[in-house]
Image (cartoon, grey):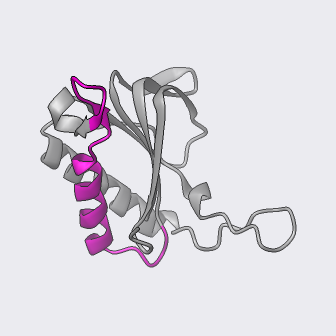
Amino acid sequence: MRAVIQRVSEASCKVDDKITGQIDAGFMILLGIEDADTDEDLQWLAQKIVGLRVFSDENGLMNKALADISGNILLISQFTLFAQTKKGNRPSFIRAARPDKAIPLYEKMIATLENLTGKKVATGIFGADMKVSLINDGPVTITIDTKVKE
């Protein structure tokens, strides 16, 4: 799994001009799922997300986690995070999981994050043409790949 996590002051997702998910301060997360992903990857990533201390404390240092600021999550499925661009100019998405594998893992990630945070996770619609808007706070953007734990 790959995640692009952006600290935001607000974010929203629209499909067909209807808001499907909207948050105030928290994380807007683009989540890519590949065929090799497992429940172990999902659990590790979910724990890492909720534990990230990237919100400012009273001294302006990044010491607070999502729960410390009562932050929210907007989770967007994003198969293009697994684009391969080595050959030519047209990306290949062969590593991205097909919907029959990706949808259950995406839905499980939503449930896991809700369980860990005790809050509803806002979402887009899997596979839809989404319009995502956000105000990146900082900007702070973190990328995490469960296969390259760095």
Q: Is residue 44 magenta?
A: yes
Q: Is residue 81 left or right of residue 72?
A: right
Extent of the magenta region: 34-62
Q: Is residue 112 above or below residue 99?
A: above
At which x and y percent is residue 124?
45, 38
Q: Residue at x 58, y 58 (%)?
A: 81
Q: Residue at x 49, y 63 (%)?
A: 99
Camera sees residue 108:
no
Name the quadrant of the N terminus: bottom left
Q: Is residue 123 above or below residue 97?
A: above
Outermost residue toward the bottom in this view: 36
At which x and y percent is residue 13?
48, 29
Q: Is residue 29 left or right of residue 15?
A: left
Q: Is residue 130 above or below residue 126?
A: above
Q: Residue at x 33, y 24 (%)?
A: 25
Name the quadrant of the C terminus: bottom left
Decide which of 122, 62 is in the foreground and name it: 62
